[in-house]
Image: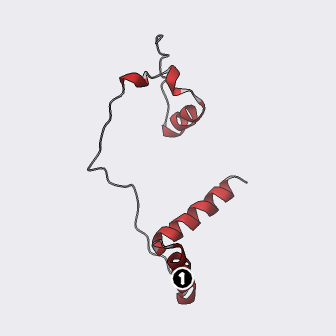
Amino acid sequence: MSKSKKIPEFKDENEEREFWAKADSTKYIDWHKGKKTLFPNLKPSTKTISLRLPEFFLDEIKAIAHKKDVPYQSLIKLFLQEKVEEELSK
């Protein structure tokens, strides 16, 4: 493989994220030299929040979750994610 391009310096994570979203990483990294790595102690970057919902609304969400055979909290996260993506794409 030919010599890889130098990875630029980034001012912050957003700039780096934008760069890698558009760049062809194979021009910067020789993936043939990559090694499989496991991160067994990696903690998910989530934050616990308290959310008050009307009881009937939560019951409806739980019923939908039951039909889909998924935990209701996972379904809420999925619904929120879909709506946020929809709003951001406007």
Helix, strand or loop under label 1: helix
Q: Name the residue nearer the viewer: 39 or 11.
A: 39
Say what amino acid the circle numbered 1 marks: Ala
Tell me which residue sits at (42%, 25%) in the image. 31
Q: Quadrant of residue 15?
A: top right
Screen quadrant of the C terminus? bottom right
Colour mapping used in the image = secondary structure
Name the residue: 47% across, 15% down. 4
Q: Nearer the viewer, residue 16 or 59?
A: 59
Percent coordinates x, y for residue 13 in the rendering: 48, 38
Kindly give the residue lying farthest to the left in the view shown. Answer: 41
Please determine whether, in this image, residue 43 is positioned above or below residue 51.
above
Q: Quadrant of residue 78?
A: bottom right
- Residue 32 is left or right of residue 81, and the answer is left
Q: Which of these two is toward me, 66 or 61? A: 66
Q: Is residue 66 above or below residue 6?
A: below
Q: Which residue occupies 46% across, 12% down?
A: 1
Q: Is residue 56 above or below residue 62?
A: below
Point out the residue furthest to the top here: 2
Dot 1 alpha-carbon crowd within 10 angstroms: few under 14, some 14 to 19, many 20 or more: few
| x then y, percent, for residue 34 | 36, 27
Query: Which residue sits at x=32%, y=54%?
Result: 43
Q: Which residue is mark 1?
A: 63
x, y percent for residue 6: 47, 17
Query: Above or below — where is 56 with respect to 32?
Result: below
Q: Residue furthest right?
A: 90
Q: Residue at the far bottom: name it.
A: 56
Query: Going by the image, does 41 lie left or right of 6?
Result: left
Q: How many marks?
A: 1
Along the viewing direction, whichever of 11 and 38 lies nearer the viewer: 38
